[in-house]
Image (tube, rainbow, N blue to C red):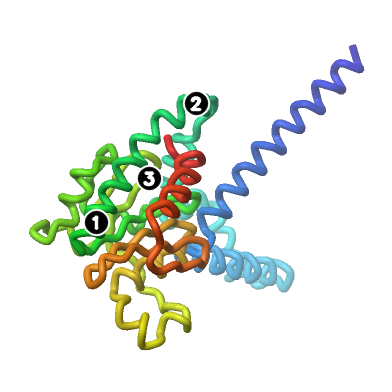
């Protein structure tokens, strides 16, 4: 029996380590390249000051440190309420078991709708920017827009970016298989040096800079349709490609939905 107890203890330990690793990994993704990293740095600095106060027997500083620690859970919930909400949404939507064949049938329709919408927007030179959330939650940017919470639809995408629509100026954010918000405000990024040349620089406006900005601040995918030229651009993983074919967009969308379509 002692042998079985040892095996059982090892299994429990492995599970505990796995759960702990998962929590740490998701938390790291949450704070990576977002405003939360500033708060984390502040917390670490506070801990260092608290340790020094304890070692040096600074009574007032030690009392303040102990008081804050006693209410640390409440303080952390207040400081990170938006991030915690996004993390819970992300974890809650993780797929446990799914057939690859079934998945492809489901998101093939979404890809078709998006490609047809992009083709129409490009042919009519209708400016648009569509952002796809990946590992890093985009809750802060979603909150700046108008809630949509709709399944992906060609007609809805075209309607959102129609020049007569009040939502056409901002970004449409997609989470998994849902369009969650439109008219979202994104950070404006500084384009790479090769795009500041006269030939290309004049063709790239605020939408392109916003797409590059969100791809630098997070790991999101951004697709832009130029209002000036109708050309489609792609931003992901610090990569900016101007004037890409729909075949390239299709490949990117297939990989996105394989991992995040839910």
Tell me the CA gap for discs 2 and 3. Answer: 21 Å
Figure quadrant of residue 211: bottom left
Query: On the picture, is 21 further left or further right than 130?
Result: right
Secondary structure at numbered mark 2: helix
Identify which residue, 232 or 64, lies in the foreground.
232
Tell me the CA gap for discs 3 and 1. Answer: 14 Å
Q: Nearer the viewer, mark 1 or mark 2?
A: 2
Q: Are marks 2 and 3 in contact (CB under 8 Å)?
A: no
Read off the residue under disc 3.
175
Read off the residue under disc 2.
101
Q: Is residue 185 visible?
A: yes
The quadrant of the image that shows the N terminus is top right
Residue 84 image position (x, y, % from top left): 45, 47
Tell me the CA gap for discs 1 and 2. Answer: 34 Å
Task: Please rate how many residues cluster around mark 2, counting C-alpha atoms within 10 Å: few if below 14, some from 14 to 19, many from 20.
Answer: few
Identify which residue, 146 or 171, lies in the foreground.
171
């Amino acid at each position: 029996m002692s042998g079985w107890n040892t095996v059982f203890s090892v299994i429990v330990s492995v599970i505990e380590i796995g759960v702990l690793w998962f929590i740490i990994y998701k938390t790291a993704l949450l704070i990576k390249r977002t405003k939360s990293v500033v708060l984390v740095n502040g917390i670490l600095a506070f801990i260092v000051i608290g340790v020094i106060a304890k070692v040096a027997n600074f009574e007032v500083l030690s009392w303040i440190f102990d008081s804050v620690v006693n209410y640390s859970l409440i303080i952390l919930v207040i400081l990170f309420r938006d991030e915690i909400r996004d993390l819970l949404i992300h974890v809650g939507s993780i797929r446990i078991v799914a057939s690859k064949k079934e998945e492809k049938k489901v998101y093939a329709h979404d890809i078709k709708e998006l490609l047809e919408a992009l083709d129409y927007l490009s042919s009519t030179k209708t400016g648009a920017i569509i952002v796809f959330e990946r590992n890093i939650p985009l809750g802060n940017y979603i909150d700046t827009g108008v809630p949509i919470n709709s399944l992906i639809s060609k007609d809805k995408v075209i309607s959102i970016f129609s020049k007569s629509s009040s939502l056409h100026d901002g970004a449409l954010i997609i989470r998994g298989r849902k369009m969650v918000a439109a008219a979202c405000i994104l950070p404006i990024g500084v384009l790479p040096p090769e795009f500041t040349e006269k030939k290309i620089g004049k063709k790239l406006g605020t939408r392109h800079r916003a797409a590059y900005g969100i791809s630098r601040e997070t790991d999101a995918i951004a697709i832009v349709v130029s209002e000036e030229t109708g050309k489609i651009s792609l931003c992901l993983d610090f990569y900016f490609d101007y004037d890409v074919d729909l075949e390239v967009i299709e490949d990117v969308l297939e990989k996105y939905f394989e991992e995040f379509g839910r």
